[in-house]
Amino acid sequence: MISTQLAVVGGGPGGYAAAFLAADLGLQVVLVDPEVNPGGVCVYRGCIPSKALLHVAKVVSESRHAKAWGVEFGEPTIDLDKLRGFKDGVVGRLTAGTGQLVKHRKVRYLQGRAEILDAHQLQVTLAEGGGERVQFDHAILATGSRPARVESLALENDCVWDSTRALDLPLIPKTLLVVGGGYIGLELGSVYATLGSEVTIVEMTSGLLPGADRDLVNVLARRIGESVKAVLLNTKVVRMTEAPGGIRVALEGPDLAQPEQVFERVLVSIGRRPNSDIPGLDRTAIQLDARGFIVVDEQRRTHEPSIFAIGDVVGEPMLAHKASHEGRIAVEVVVGHNVAFEPRAIPAVVFTDPELAWCGLTEAQAASEHRAVAIARFPWSASGRAISIDRTDGLTKLLLDPDSGRVLGVGLVGAGAGELIAEGVLAVEMGATATDLKLSIHPHPTLTETVMESAEVFFGQATHVYRPRKLKT
Ligand code: FAD
């Protein structure tokens, strides 16, 4: 029997951030996860390996594009084993790092799976065999999520991949169908398209990246449209069956030239569902909502007073940085600080080429809430930096309070948008106004200037675009 002040179940970016902060604040901590070292979906089968592959895809695209600048490298050859090795090496390096941090902080790490016995006890089945009883004052559940499945697409066949299988890089299929035009499908579809697959994307709604603002998505969609064979919107996969050479897929949608096609591989990325089926959860007062997320309050407390929950298992947005932030808040609450999870801006980044990012209020959200906003857009075709790197396919926009000029939201699409959005997060969180952004000297020539110049657009005074007209509200 181990007795501890805090038990954390799940070693993803939510769980390990929580465990590490708790140890830093002087608590005894037990962290339970099935992997050898903490990392969770994010490090083992999500954010990190996908970004390693997207980086390689970017290099390949740029090397092809360099022809237009007078530099020719020739068509790249892909050594799949080496590429896989690079990606696995990235994951290995990071997880070795989290393993070291566990030791430095003297967190008791149990490699295994936890079952809840009651509001103060866990039973851990250890990976090495045997078990361990853990008695805790408080626990944080951070069990994450897994790929969603629907019945019509649940074909048990090696040719049907989920994101985890796609990240394993088993082969570069000649044809790949990506089911779902969300960020995971677009990121992985882009990787395979660049590596040589003929990619088709099917999305059942009327646009890619449902939820993101259309003016940003349109810029990305144009470029994606050039790199894949087809993007089929308003289209559904109704049936998948085994066929020689892959999977026969029946599609339903408008203007389909071929309602049935065979693809060598099908990647199903239709969202993720919470891992809230934790054994023994029913022995507590913890409640789930209609979608299966654990219900928590703003301090991340469940209905069981000694147990908190954070990360993907408590709801959208299912993002690593949101999980980590929640984890740190929950720990602060455990040690008695008067804090709550109430961010004004949780950034979302789609790491395609170009990248797409937003934070705070979106235009779609403002419209649905009938909220008056001023929108100031700066096209990257007017940015010296964007022109000099030959990447004018970008847009920066600010959503502002029309009276005070306060920054309510920021949207970006373009090369490196994922890095640029951090300034937007700071602006929204700090309650900055368009005047603050306009008066902050941004380095030249950089893409960050597009944020400053968007603020200038709000006043009809942008140096590099002529926009004297009144802004749309
Ligand atoms: P997870 O990372 O899911 O970790 C939960 C852990 O708990 C897992 O290790 C699981 O095995 C363990 N566990 C479950 N049940 C038990 C149990 N009973 N006992 C012990 N352990 C248990 N997010 C971003 O922010 N940026 C990105 O670029 C990004 N890219 C992604 C790309 C892909 C392909 C995917 C799939 C996801 C991506 N995400 C990204 C999402 C991100 O991975 C998740 O939001 C994040 O990992 C959630 O963290 P978490 O701590 O809630 O849970």
Image: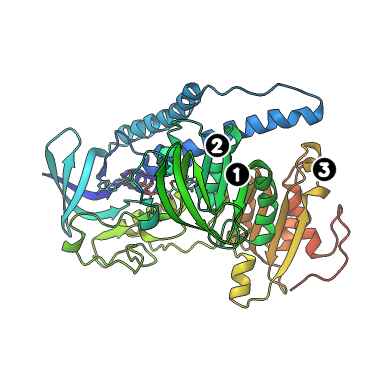
Q: Is residue 341 left or right of residue 281?
A: right
- Does label 3 or label 1 sit earlier along the sequence? 1
Q: Is mark 3 within 8 Å of ligand 1?
A: no
- Does label 3 or label 2 sit earlier along the sequence? 2
- Nearest the eye: 160 or 207: 160
Please, what secondary structure does the residue beneath circle 3 have? helix
In the figure, 174 relative to 338: above or below?
A: above
Q: What's the CA distance linking mark 3 and mark 1?
A: 22 Å
Label annotation for residue 192: 2
Task: Determine crowd level at label 1: few under 14, some 14-19, many 20+ residues with C-alpha closer than 10 A.
Answer: many
Quarter in which the C terminus is drawn: bottom right
Q: What's the CA distance linking mark 2 and mark 1?
A: 12 Å
Label annotation for residue 352: 1
**Can residue 422 be seen from the camera position used here?**
no
- Does label 2 or label 1 sit earlier along the sequence? 2
Q: Is residue 337 left or right of residue 193?
A: left
Q: Is residue 239 left or right of residue 125?
A: right
Q: Residue furthest bottom?
A: 370
**Can residue 80 be seen from the camera position used here?**
yes
**Contact, CB < 8 Å: mark 3 with mark 1?**
no
The spot of residue 463 in percent (x, y) is: 87, 54
Residue at (81, 48) in percent of width and height: 381
The spot of residue 300 in percent (x, y) is: 35, 62
Residue type at the position of mark 1: Thr
Residue type at the position of mark 3: Gly
Residue type at the position of mark 2: Tyr
Image quarter of residue 295: bottom left
**Contact, CB < 8 Å: mark 3 with mark 2?**
no
Task: Determine crowd level at label 2: few under 14, some 14-19, many 20+ residues with C-alpha closer than 10 A.
Answer: many
Quarter in which the N terminus is drawn: top left
Q: Is mark 1 within 8 Å of ligand 1?
A: no
The residue labelled by disc 3 is: 384
